[in-house]
Image: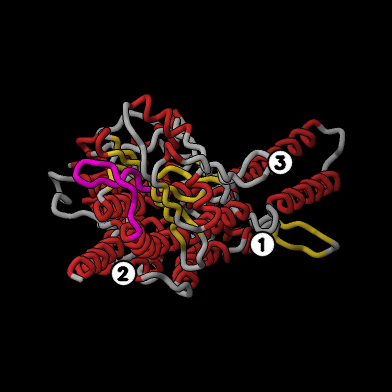
Amino acid sequence: MKNTQNNLKKLIDIGIALSKEKNINILLEMILNEARIISNSDGGTVYLLSKDDKKLNFEIMQTESLGIKFGGSSIPVPESIYPVKLYNDDGTKNLNNVSAVCALTGKTINIKNAYDNDEYDFSGVKGFDEKHNYHSKSFLNVPLKNHKDKVIGVLQLLNAQQKDKIISFSDELVDLVEALSSQASVALTNQLLIEEQKSLFRSFIRLVVDALDKKDPVTGGHCNRVPLISMMIADYINSDKKEKYKDFSFSEDQMDELYVAAWLHDFGKVATPDHIMNKSTKLQGLYDKIDQVKLRFEILKRDIELEFYKKQVQDSDDFKESLEIKLKQINDEFKFLEQSNLGGEYMSEDLQEKVREISNYKISVNDDIKSILSDKDVDFLTISRGTLSKEDRKIMENHVSLSYELLDKLTYPEHLKDVPYIAGCHHEKLNGEGYPNGYTAEQLPLQARIIAIADVFEGLTAPDRPYKKPYKLSKALKILKFMVDDNEIDPDLFQLMIRNKLHLKYANEHLRPEQIDDINEKELLS
């Protein structure tokens, strides 16, 4: 009675310990360790069923007397140890291997003496024994089943011992190990289900980014690189033992939260119109209207030629020279508009005024006199930076609000509940001048600050933007430094990046060689 109570207490304690472990590799190791202790076994193996349900993979292997420990917290199981096939090459069940039969039938198999057993093939075991001067005698194989009663693995114990002698596994020990295996199966199933849910959610994230990539390859590339930079920064924070973050470290859940938020920060762009996302010129809508402007200039040149022919003597040299000068001027002005249409870092007020002057030209279409450029054309062609008008920019900036709105519709586990908020803050600034909400520093969690600086750094250095050349590292970092000085991005994160040379590590893998130039790190850290 007392022994039964002790065993019951042991099982309860083991069950509690197993239920607390989240790392599957460590959990498997715990399962084998506890099973070996409770049965006083010299060794054992934990197998897990492969995804195609055709093999048993070696996950944990131990033989105490030989000092063999593979898997879990020890080194991985060598690749030279092949999985156990559940089916032969002709598709029939593998009934020669005891672990395979245990998995196929879902029943416990107790082998009292492998050397006396002719039901299963133990030739591999005997070869192992000869090589290592060992004697594998008693085996206990117990199936591990999930909540649907499906076998997900096998627990195999080797050589039960009593007073330094190898004994067979008694019925009492079998009952005890089966009880433990049942508890272990519950804990293992829970963790496998959690892993499956994580895998499903991350697959969904990848699906979203793939959808954005199909919609706009530039955004797809951006959404792949921002989480990469974000996680690099987080890793540096966790390893920072001397500076700002020496007393701080992200937990595993917080790292997962950052990872998900970084991948989904531009989720709202799924609803942003293509002609805004892909706007490589100022006049681009569903198509680039510069071709319409070119046609109007051809009409203008026609009208000028007609006017000259009416007023001038056709064989006059002065007439020809004046006409050529005027037509060249018109061509040059159209080339100027073509160049203006491309956008850029900055368009001066003088150049904007030149666009307005050109718009004063009139052309005749079907006896209707109209300006060569519409008011809207002028507005677009005088955009001072980039290719987006104020209206376009509002539509583009709305992707942040959409990201929050759409992500907030999902049901998250507790540790991911702030993903919509973090993702929705990546364009906010510490000084409160960001968008969409104008949050200030105290409202921006560290994860949001990380994504914000990663977002800007990637945008400045992105090698695949069709509407602008990528900046060199030195220029990109100077712009980040200006943003630090203007209290827009987190200064501690910026200094962490520079001190750890994140920019170089990232650039060597993801930027063009010509973007990597000399950087004055002392100046950036001042």
Which comes sooner in the sequence, label 1 or label 3?
3
How far apart in space, not on screen, are marks 1 and 3 (Cα)?
22 Å
Q: Nearer the viewer, residue 158 or 402?
A: 158
Is residue 265 visible in the rendered structure shown here? no
Report crowding for label 2: few under 14, some 14 to 19, many 20 or more residues within 10 A (C-alpha): some
What is the quadrant of the N terminus in the image?
A: bottom left
Q: What residue is pinned by disc 3?
A: 326
Residue 28 place in picture, x, y as percent? 35, 52
> Relative to 329, is 18 above or below?
below
How far apart in space, not on screen, are marks 2 and 1 (Cα)?
38 Å
Q: Amino acid at mark 1?
A: Ser
Q: Nearer the viewer, residue 186 or 227?
A: 186
Q: Amino acid at mark 2?
A: Tyr
Q: Give the farthest residue toward the front.
A: 116
Left or right for 54, reference 313: left
Name the residue located 80 percent from the left edge and 65 percent from the top edge: 368
> Relative to 412, is 157 above or below?
above
Which comes sooner in the sequence, label 2 or label 1?
1
Q: Amino acid at mark 3?
A: Lys
Residue 198 place in picture, x, y as percent? 44, 60
Q: What residue is pinned by disc 2?
A: 439
Find out whether residue 227 is within the magenta segment.
no
Q: What residue is pinned by disc 1?
A: 374
Left or right for 347, reference 286: left
